Amino acid sequence: MEFNPDGTLKVTKRKVSDHLIVLRLVDELHFSLGKKLFVDVLRGEENTRIKKLDLHKKIYHGALGGYDGDELLQFIEILIVVGFIEIELQKGKYPVLSMTKKGKEELNDSKEEFMIDASLKNKDLIPSKIIPPPVSFTVAPITSADKEIFAACDFFLGQFTNEQKKAIIDSSVRQLCIAGAGSGKTSVLTHKIAYLVKFLGVSPESILAITFTRKAKQEMIARLAELLPDVIIKVETFNSFAEKELLKKGNQLYGKQKRMASPKEFFTLVLKAIASIGFDLDTFLNHYFLARERRGKEQRELFFSFLYDFRAVLDTYLSQDKPEEYFATRMQDAVLTEKITAQNIVKLAKIVIADLEHEGLRTYSDQIIDINRLYQEHPQTKETYPWVLVDEYQDVNPLQVKLIHLVATKNLFVVGDPRQSIYAWRGSNPQIIYDYITKETTVVELTTNFRSTESVVDFSNELIGQTNRGRHFFTPLSSSQSRPGLVSFVKMGSEEGEAIAVVDQIKSMACDMSDIFVLSRTNKGLDKIRDICDQQSIPYLLRTDEKQERNREAREQEITLSTVHAIKGLEAEMVFVVGATMNNYPCKTKDHRFVDLLAAKEGYDQFEEERRILYVACTRAKKELRISYVGAPSPFLNEQVLKKVTHSAREVLTDLSSTKNPKETSVEQITRQRSGLKRWRFLESQERNIPAYMIFSDRALESLLDLQPLSTDELDSVNGLGKVKIREFGRDILFVLHS
């Protein structure tokens, strides 16, 4: 024992290692939990299920509340790898956590220390199932033989970079083009087809180009018509290719004639199924949507939104061997009200599938499943091509990959960008691109961004460069542009204030209204902007996941309001990313909760996909990127990323203020600033139950008004503000001072 100088016993406080907290919670529980629920308890969540099981009363409830769910899931995986915890199947099918013998020994006599922050930084500890191991590949070099071809074909290739030229002329059997945002991949793909026909003598009939959307298909056909005026190249989407084949050869699979259900036929079958389980449409939609989701929307809009979700559930039902068992497992942790609605959705899927079969109709998902079955069960029906070229390969799912390999007999060229893979809920995964890489694959990278200014590119590089704590293969892009750009990051006081500020900035812009995007993670995030636009008679085009007008272009006088998923592949001079908060990126309030419950694909890193969604939003900007948020910012926008911001909140909001109030004098401005700072100081002190002077003194207030600091570094010069106060209040003070 040790004693203090005054004779009292010396007590040394030791911080409990994080791994012991996890083990103690496992030991404290009288029943086993799945990983997700276990993490919710560690974080201190108090949802219905936790309260029902009295988990909020446990000693270690909230013991690791400072970490996000994905970090804790990774930490648990590490503890599984080192052997303290294991996964066992409860009742033979439900995976739950349990402590191993080694874990019990460690709990009784600890000899190790595993802290979360240090463990997650140790890349040797990160298990492969959370962060895939590096894929060993080398970008193909540009050879002297390549350069000779570049020179000989300069009249055809002169406009391209050497990377693009390499992608166009390479004739390897297995090729991958990793094409960064704005790197001209569509132009490369169409010129590659023209090169094959014009210079290598490949027969047009032996070429198939596959893309995802009708719009992309039409654009590709138009470009090829310019490059090869008298030649017909087969360009299809996955679904259009499958439907044409099934109409010609489907009898051999079905034993009867089947066709694609029209939208009206599908709607009618769904309405009939809803009635058959005892609901009228209004009652069913009231059960399906939360009150906030129904607010301000008519029945028709809600029904179309439901249909969008229902198709995903229907696709999942069709892809499962034992769908009802699969859905039962997915629903096991749902709260009672959600479980009842989910069970009704599964009933609907079963009824609609039976009715489709009876009517001789098929869905989009049927198309890919059935064409694969036809080709496998009746190989003589296969439509094959020596040259297959696939666009947007980062968006393919396993069924589409199977179809590609069924039709490609020799040469396969795929182009995509793992940084822009954002459709995991329908089966895509950036790992699919890496799985394509073998020792026979020629890999070419396009790293020049022709779309965005250097400021936007640098910011986006830093954002995506944080992926998996820097453990990735993303080559930073460079901008081809010399014109200055703008990236701003502004905290707003309220969602309504954010919407007003965005609309005011839009009204002050000199560019065409149709060249402005306002992007949100969710449909709900656009509501305030829509309201302000309606009030001020500002025309807009709304693009959401389920919106029927997604293929229409914005007209002149008309801005685009869109979710990130609905805008992918498009670009604008100026992009506003609103709601860049910790609740939206990563998203905690999904627009499609029953899709997440029943149809979201498993086995992918949702946290990193959310980072990619924000990256896709930012890379839509050609010249200016303006990001705003209310409350706490997204964890993806950390200090390292924000170093790439080019314009402070003060510069952005002062520019706006000068546009709105050009005659305001400096005296009036300081009076307004003094009033705003005093009001904020009072509210902050009330919330913390401390005197106002403890936030900052009147002397510090006058120093702020005199110095007009623009950054937290400049706050160091303010009398009466120490480093602790700057760290705690600095950003809010700057926002109030300059807003």
Image (cartoon, grey):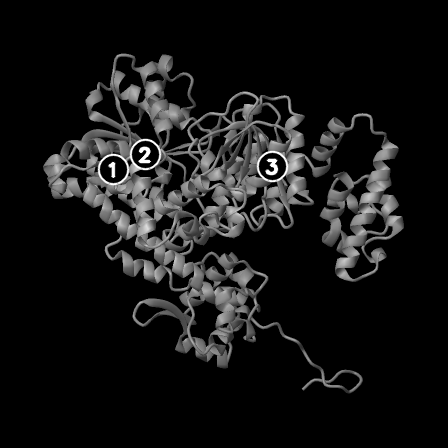
x then y, percent, for residue 378: 11, 40
**Spot occupied by residue 16 in the image (x, y as percentages of width and height):** 58, 73
Q: Amino acid type of disc 1?
A: Ile
- Kind of element beneath mark 2: strand
Q: Are marks 3 and 2 in contact (CB under 8 Å)?
A: no
Instruction: Classify the position of the C terminus by image quarter.
Output: top right
Residue linked to disc 3: 531
Q: Residue drawn 54% across and 61% down?
A: 118
Sequence-first disc among 3 and 1: 1
Query: Cβ–Cβ below 8 Å for labels 3 and 1?
Result: no
Please state the horizontal and vertical placement of residue 31, each as a whole percent of the image.
43, 76
Labels 1 & 2 near each other (Cβ < 8 A): yes
Residue 50 visible to the viewer? yes
Cα distance between the residues tagged 1 and 2 = 10 Å
Q: Give left or right: position of 513 versus 29.
A: right
Screen quadrant of the N terminus: bottom right
Q: Which residue is the site of mark 1?
A: 404
Identify the mark at residue 414; answer none if there is no mark.
2
Task: Give the class, few, some or many, for how many residues have Cα within 10 Å of label 3's Cα (few <14, many ≥20).
Answer: some
Q: Position of residue 249 (x, y in %)?
A: 14, 34
Above or below — where is 134 with respect to 208? Answer: below
Could you tell whether 31 is left or right of 736 in the image? Answer: left
